[in-house]
Structure formats: C-alpha cells, structure tokens
Image (spheres, rainbow, N blue to C red):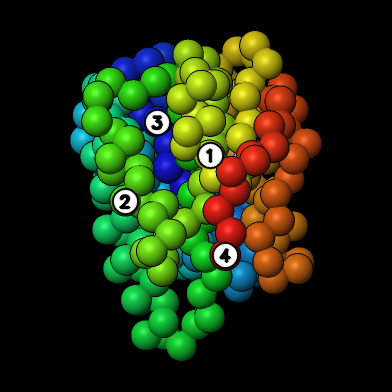
Amino acid sequence: MVIDASSSMKPHEAVLNATLSRLHYNLATNPRVSEFARVSVIAFSTDVHVVIPMSDMEQVPAMPEVICGGRTEYGKTFDRVRECIEQDVSNLRMQNLDVLRPTIFFLTDGGPTDARWQDSFRKLVDRNWPRHPHVIAYGFGGAKRVVLEQVATKALFIADGSDTESALSAAITGLLNSLIASSKTGQMQIATDVKGFEYVEVTQEYVD
C-alpha cells in the first residue's frame, strides 16, 4: 500500500491514521488474509517512509502513526517501491513461500510535483523486470484522472466528488475487500464496487 502523505493530506491526518489502524485490525484478525498476503505500507511526500515493511500483519502489534507534510514526489516513491519489491520478493522466497505478482494499491489526493516521475514509473512496471507489479490506483481530492490513467495498470478508481475523508475511508475499505476476496481464491481479485468511486477499466493492462 502506497499512500499520499503530502501537505494536502495534513488536515485529514487524524482520519488517515484512524483508517490505517482499522485496516491493520481487520487484516491482523483475519487468519485467511494473513496467510495469503504479506503487506507493507509506504507513505510518500517530499520523502518516502516505509511505515511497515513487508509483514504478516498478525505479527505487527500496531500501525505506526503517519505524519503528513511536504510535496507529492511520485518519482522518489516509485524508485523506493521498486527497491522494496526487489528485496521483499527475495526475502519471501528465502522463506520458501510462493510469490504472486506484487500488487501496489496507490492512494493519492493530488498530482505529482516532480517533472520526471514517468521515468521512475517506467522502470517500476518494465515488463522485462520479472518482478514488475500490478498497480491499482485510487484518486480523490485534487488527484487528476489524466495522471492516474498513466499510473494504473490493473484498475483505476476515481472519486465522484466525495469529501477527502469519506473517499479515503472508502478507498481503504475497497483495498481490504480486494485482499479478502483474493485470499479466498488464491489469486488477485479486485473489489470494483467502492462507495463514492467510479471504477475505470484499464485497457492497457500488463499481462503476466
């Protein structure tokens, strides 16, 4: 999970942290999801912070607090996510775990403030990199559809005008429902019915 923690999210910081705590509780208390999914939480602004490294959420006692502030730097974020995936997949395989294609749930309320972020994104989703991830994007607040259409490779959700706090809560609920559905089938499943969001089918989907 990669979530925008820039200055535009500062007024919603308390709701963000409460919603993340709820997500942690629901994941940690669902044995099927814990068995199926290893989850990391990354918050980005001017800098990128790994809030929780790739973990079995049953083993994480509490969700650390996210502090919002700074710019919305997409490029640094995609670079760091690529590094994390490289390390995380290696670590999981050392534990003799089968690893599906990584999936990024990308949540943002604004557009990138760095001009060359596309270069970093292309490296992240380069099909020649065996670990290139799927990206499911949720945009709300000031997020631009035209930008997120360049980011989403699996699915795109655009808020229909709901206030940021309601949209944030709904997006994380959608993420949770996707993980629950996926844990039942053993394959990535997307919960497309997310309150207050338009589901946009991605036509240029990356193929496994």
Disc sitting over residue 152 in the figure: 1
* Three-letter code for the amino acid on which mark 3 is drawn: Asp
Where does residue 184 sit, x and y in percent of width and height?
76, 66
Question: Is tag 3's residue or tag 2's residue first in the polypeptide sequence?
Answer: 3
Q: Which residue is mark 2?
A: 123
* Three-letter code for the amino acid on which mark 4 is drawn: Asp
Q: Is residue 60 left or right of residue 170?
A: left
Nearest the camera: 172 or 117? 117
Labels 1 and 2 touching (C-beta < 8 A): no
Graded by Cα atoms within 10 Å as few (under 14), some (14 to 19) or many (20 or more), the crowding at tag 2 reads some
Question: Residue 196's quadrant in the figure?
Answer: top right
Q: Nearer the viewer, mark 4 or mark 1?
A: 4
Q: Which residue is mark 4?
A: 208
Question: Is tag 4's residue or tag 3's residue first in the polypeptide sequence?
Answer: 3
* Three-letter code for the amino acid on which mark 1 is drawn: Ala
Q: Is residue 137 left or right of residue 181?
A: left
Disc sitting over residue 4 in the figure: 3
| Residue plotted at (24% across, 30% down) | 116
| Residue plotted at (69% across, 71% down) | 186
| Residue plotted at (63% across, 31% down) | 157
Question: Is tag 3's residue or tag 1's residue first in the polypeptide sequence?
Answer: 3
Query: In what element is the residue under mark 1?
Result: loop
Query: In what element is the residue under mark 4?
Result: loop
Q: Nearer the viewer, mark 4 or mark 3?
A: 4
Labels 2 and 4 touching (C-beta < 8 A): no
* Three-letter code for the amino acid on which mark 2 is drawn: Lys
Q: State how far apart marks 4 and 1 are (Cα).
A: 15 Å
Question: Residue 138's quadrant in the figure?
Answer: top right
